[in-house]
Amino acid sequence: MTKQTVEGNGGLGSETGLSADEMLFDRIFEEGVLGDQTDRARRLFVDYGEHIQGDVVNVLHFAIGKDLVVDVLDELDLHYQTNLELQDPEVRGLVYNSGGRNETADLFERIYSQTLGLGLEPQGSSS
C-alpha cells in the first residue's frame, strides 16, 4: 500500500498525485484539524510505514485533544531520523535491538505516558 498511487476510485489517486497512504491520511484526519502541521504529520504517517501507521494516528488523535500536536510530531520526527529512516520500510516498527527492546514501541509508550499524560495499564491487567 505504501508509495503507490491508487488507481481505483475513478483514478482519483492519479488525478491528485497522492499516494495511497496520503489519501488514507486525508480520509482519517478532517481538513484543518492539524492546522499548519498537516503536511508534516502526513509525511511522518507515510514515512513510518504500514506497520505503525495506526500508532501514529492514535497518538495524533490524543495530541489534537490536548493541543500537543507539535510536541508529538517533534518526538515522532526525531525517532524517525534516529531509528527508522535507515530501516527497510517493510520492517519498520518490527525491529528489536540487541537488548531485546523494540525502541519504536518504547517511543509510543513514552508519548502516551509522558507527553500526553495518559496512564497505561500494564499488559495482562484487567479492570
Image (cartoon, rainbow, N blue to C red):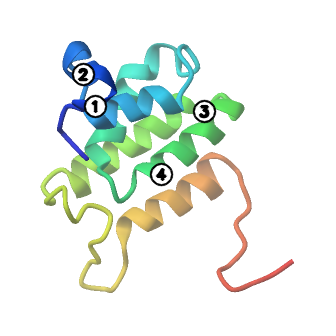
Mark carried by residue 8: 1
Residue 43 at x, y percent in the picture: 30, 32
- Dot 3, how many residues are within 10 Å of its Cα: few (below 14), some (14-19), or many (20+)? some
Q: How far apart are marks 2 and 1 (CA)?
A: 5 Å
Question: Closest to the observer: 13 or 121?
Answer: 13
Question: First in sequence: mark 1 or mark 4?
Answer: 1
Could you tell me which residue is drawn at 36 percent across and 73 percent down? 102
SS for tag 1? helix
Residue 34 placement, left or right of 24: right
Are circles 4 and 2 on residues that touch, CB within 8 Å? no
Q: In this figure, which residue is indicated by the disc labeled 3?
A: 68
Q: In this figure, which residue is indicated by the disc labeled 4?
A: 54
Picture quarter containing residue 120? bottom right
Residue 23 at x, y percent in the picture: 36, 29
Could you tell me which residue is drawn at 29 percent across and 35 percent down? 20
Question: First in sequence: mark 4 or mark 3?
Answer: 4
Q: In the image, what residue type sits under mark 2?
A: Gly
Q: In the image, what residue type sits under mark 1?
A: Gly
Question: First in sequence: mark 4 or mark 2?
Answer: 2
